[in-house]
Image: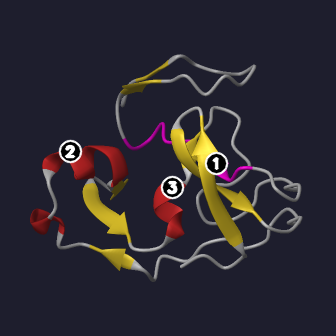
Amino acid sequence: MMQIPVYVKETKAGLGIFSVLAVKKDTVIWKKIAVDTDINKYPQSYLAKYAVYNDGTPYLCTDLANFMNHSCDPNTDGEIAIRDIKQDEELTYDYNDEEDFVCSCGSQNCRKIMVLQ
């Protein structure tokens, strides 16, 4: 469940979530309360886009955290702000430990391809 006020808007990746307010580093932004582990009821195409993995087990966020996009230079670890976040800045985290994919985040630190080890 989001712990800070956010809104959704279009990004180059589709939809993303943005902070309504400035957020200080170490602020809890999300708690894993609003999740659905009964994923068999969802189409595979939906799961491919929105499932999150924790130790290899998929689940879906049932709040706006579903729209948190990847960045190779993230501002959160998915739950806590890892640096100060500006008002109206997109909230992102590094998906690298969750799935293989081609990255197009555009950050100066972009790794281009994420491959699970």
Q: Residues within 10 Å of mark 1 (few under 14, many from 20)?
A: many
> In the rendering, which numbered label is found on residue 67?
3
Q: Callout 3: helix, strand or loop?
A: helix
Query: Looking at the image, which residue is at 35% across and 37% down?
Result: 99
The Cα–Cα distance between marks 1 and 2, rounded to whole angstroms, is 22 Å
Q: Residues within 10 Å of mark 3 (few under 14, many from 20)?
A: many
| View extreme (front): residue | 10
Task: Give the residue type at disc 3.
Answer: Phe
| View extreme (left): residue | 40
Counting labels gives 3
Residue 8, image quadrant: bottom right
- Residue receiving disc 2: 45
The Cα–Cα distance between marks 3 and 1, rounded to whole angstroms, is 9 Å
Q: Position of residue 22 (x, y in %)?
A: 89, 64
The Cα–Cα distance between marks 2 and 3, rounded to whole angstroms, is 15 Å
Q: Position of residue 49 (x, y in %)?
A: 33, 45
